[in-house]
Amino acid sequence: MTLRPAVFIDRDGTLTDEVGYVNHPARLSLIPRAAEAIRRLNAAGVAAVVVTNQAGIARGYFSEDVLGKVHDALHAQLASAGARLDGLYACIHHPTEGRPPYRAACECRKPKPGLLRRAAEELGLDLARSVMVGDKASDLVPARAVGAAAVLVLTGYGLGEWEYRRAHFDVQPDHVARDLLDAVEWALARRSLA
Ligand SMILES: [Mg+2]
Ligand SMILES: [Zn+2]
């Protein structure tokens, strides 16, 4: 199987509005131009893969069933805009909150790279030719860990992260983008995705 490149996309603050815990599908809304960004990836044959920390499950704020409903809504909102995700991976753990099995020192909670590695294995992705896009410094770390490019968007927490915290970033972004669409345009212009 030929490995293909991916753009890994954080969910809250990058693809959808950062509103705190999304404990009901009604709280989920796409950021403007985000569906267009996914459509561009679909058209280019680049895998669009969401990787998201959802520790609200470990904390007992909402159930896996509710997370499933939220993600059904995400797929439906994207589909109605002609866009489709190739994968959606969530870490539902927290290292110190809640009870096992959700309270766990897992390998998938960002900044760890487990979700990216799992997606690469299951979907046949070439991590070295891939890009990870997120609105927090903790989204940049897993990108660097797997040899992918790291892009910070200024939506969600991104503007504050970039303006006030960048001196403390463990990993500096390879690019700073206004939003997901700008990030995808940058990614598609890189020769590695061609
Ligand atoms: Mg985020
Ligand atoms: Zn996890």
Image (cartoon, rainbow, N blue to C red):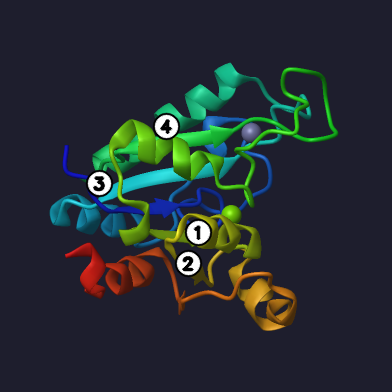
- Which-is-in-front pick, marks 3 and 2? 2
Is the residue at mark 1 in contact range of ligand 1, meaning its CB lies under 8 Å from it? no
Give, as a three-letter code, the residue at label 1.
Ala
- What is the number of the mark on residue 150? 2
- Residue bearing mark 4: 73
Give, as a three-letter code, the residue at label 3.
Ala
Q: Where does the image place residue 44, in percent across and percent down from the top left?
A: 15, 57
In the rendered structure, are the residues bearing label 1 and label 2 in contact, judged by CB atoms less than 8 Å apart?
A: yes
SS for callout 3: loop
SS for callout 1: helix
Dividing the image into four quarters, tell me where ligand 1 lies: bottom right
- Which comes sooner in the sequence, label 3 or label 4? 4
- The residue that appears at 31% across and 74% down in the rendered structure is 186
- What is the number of the mark on residue 81? 3
Q: CA distance from mark 4 to mark 1?
A: 27 Å
Give, as a three-letter code, the residue at label 4.
Ala
Q: CA distance from mark 3 to mark 4?
A: 13 Å
The quadrant in which the N terminus is found is top left
Whether residue 28 is visible here, answered yes or no, is no
SS for callout 2: strand
- Which comes sooner in the sequence, label 3 or label 2? 3
Q: CA distance from mark 4 to mark 2?
A: 27 Å
- Left or right: 117 with respect to 157? left
Give, as a three-letter code, the residue at label 2.
Ala
Q: CA distance from mark 3 to mark 2?
A: 26 Å
Q: Nearer the viewer, residue 184 or 100?
A: 100
